[in-house]
Amino acid sequence: MLRQRVITAVLLLAVLLPALFHHRIEAFAALTLLMLAAAGWEWARLNGQGQPVALSTGVGLGALLGLAWWLGALEQSWRILWLLAGAAWVLLAVVALGRGVGGWARWPVALRLPAGLVLLACAWLAMVQARQIGLGFLLSVFLLVWTADIAAYFGGKRFGRRKLAPSVSPGKSWEGVVSGLLGVVLLALAWVALDRAGWALEGSLYSRLWDRGPWLAALALLFLTAMSVVGDLIESLVKRSAGVKDSSQLLPGHGGVLDRVDALLPVLPLAMMLATL
């Protein structure tokens, strides 16, 4: 299992890193569009759709995103969209997680299926526009989510006592969440210090927030870290409702695309919202 995870991770990085670091965004936009189309296929399957409908959903999502790209969507300002997407994620955090696994199945598919696809589309648009802002900005958003996840895992393993959402994700604890937040704060402080010294990639999310005031930066980091946890919990809730462990087996050893990007989905538009206010 570990060997398979490592092989898949190496292959993914071999494809993703050249596209991410290229000075033009076309390769990165195209690669991530394919990933989000695959996530659309997974989302349809998690919401009870058969293979033909799920495949059509994923292809349709990819085609619509491609059309939006061709029509110039990446060159437009989407401040209102980021606000709406952020509000939708907060609403999901309150309502969906409050109702639990059983409550999710009672929502009509005609509502939850397209709503999820819209949030996936927002995440792709936010991710590509974040790359347009700069490599430092996008990497700082990625590292916020990854640091929160890694620190929460080890903090939860070491100190975890109080379960965060036992019916949705039994492994998560409040101590893990606090550990994740501390990890993000340390990352942000280190990045801002290196940025000021001219040693880090410029234009990070952390420096942008810090320039607006340390207290605002602290509140924003708290909010983004919490929403990364929400993204993870929402996907866990949907998978439990569907009775599956992984969103798919597209990434051997890692599950599906949604399993890898769930925490990023709310954070990307929210980071763009904070950066463009």
Image (cartoon, grey):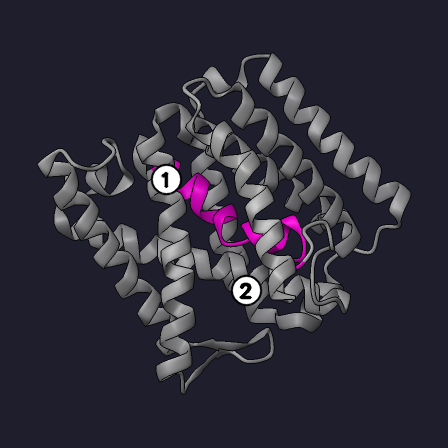
Q: Which residue is mark 1?
A: 139
Quarter of the N terminus within the rendering: bottom right
Label 2, secondary structure: give it: helix
- Residue shown at the point (66%, 33%) measured from the top left: 34
- Residue shown at the point (56%, 67%) measured from the top left: 97
> Would residue 258 be counted in the magenta stretch?
yes
Q: Which residue is mark 2?
A: 233
- In magenta, the rendered stretch is 253-273
Q: How far is mark 2 from mark 1, CA to CA?
A: 23 Å
Among numbered discs 2 and 1, the one appearing first in the sequence = 1
User: Considering depth in this image, is 270 or 205 the residue closer to the camera?
Assistant: 205
For the residues labelled 2 and 1, say whether their Cβ atoms are less than 8 Å apart. Answer: no
Q: Is residue 175 above or below residue 89?
A: below
Nearer the viewer's eye, disc 2 or disc 1? 1
Q: Which amino acid, mark 2?
A: Leu
- Can I make out residue 101 in this image? yes
Quarter of the C terminus within the rendering: top left
